[in-house]
Image: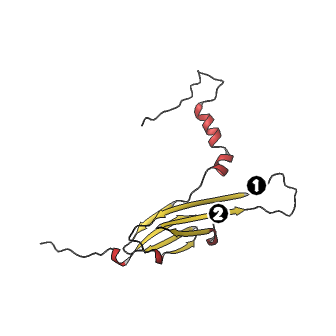
């Protein structure tokens, strides 16, 4: 792959905006950044001897906003949130509805015990603990060197 750079040369086409400035004005506009871009929370996935752990950073939500669904070894985490700014007076010049949603899906490994999945939401982080099946738990032992 080749990296292509666009430079605005002040001597050429002074009346035409630079190519990168056109894109900056379009994609850095608040309309696109606030309304059109999808915001998906970041996830951390870790493993211990007897569990898999999924942590999803989702501040500003409530526990009831989340829906967790397990279907065919795929764990789906979804949020659909509608905020309406209700005002008793109708004297405002502009009013916007806020609507945000996302879905994150994770395929569980064969070693996961889907029956024992637990989730809790605390301080803006959704923590999901997925136990491992007994036969899949890591067994450690000391190996003697001869």
- Residue for point 34% across, 74% down: 136
Say which quarter of the image contains residue 79: bottom right
Q: Name the quarter where the C terminus is drawn.
A: bottom left
The residue that disc 1 covers is 96
Rendering coords of residue 72 (x, y %): 48, 67
> Rounded to the nearest whole Å, what is the CA distance between mark 1 and mark 2?
17 Å
Q: Name the quarter where the N terminus is drawn.
A: top left
- Residue for point 65% across, 38% down: 25
Q: How packed is label 2: few (under 14 Cα within 10 Å), some, or many (20 or more)?
A: few
Rendering coords of residue 140 (x, y %): 28, 75
Q: Which mark is residue 66?
A: none
Say which quarter of the image contains residue 120: bottom right
- Residue for point 57% across, 28% down: 8
Q: Upstream in the sequence, badge 1 or badge 2?
A: 2
Rendering coords of residue 59 (x, y %): 60, 64
Tally of numbered discs: 2
The residue that disc 2 covers is 80
Residue at the extreme front of the image, as rendered? 72
Is 43 situated above or below 63? above
Judged from the image, the secondary structure of the residue bearing numbered disc 2 is strand
């Amino acid at each position: 792959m080749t990296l292509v750079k666009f430079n605005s040369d002040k001597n050429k086409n002074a009346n035409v905006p630079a190519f990168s400035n056109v894109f900056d004005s379009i994609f850095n506009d608040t309309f696109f950044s606030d309304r059109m871009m999808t915001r998906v929370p970041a996830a951390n996935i870790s493993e211990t001897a007897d569990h898999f752990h999924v942590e999803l950073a989702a501040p500003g939500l409530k526990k009831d906003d989340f829906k967790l669904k397990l279907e065919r070894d795929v764990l789906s985490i979804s949020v659909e949130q509608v905020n309406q700014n209700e005002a008793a007076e109708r004297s405002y010049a502009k009013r916007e509805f806020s609507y945000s949603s996302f879905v994150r899906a994770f395929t569980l490994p064969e070693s996961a015990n889907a029956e024992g999945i637990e989730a809790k939401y605390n301080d803006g982080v959704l923590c999901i603990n997925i136990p491992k099946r007994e036969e899949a738990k890591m067994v450690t032992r000391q190996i003697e060197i001869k």
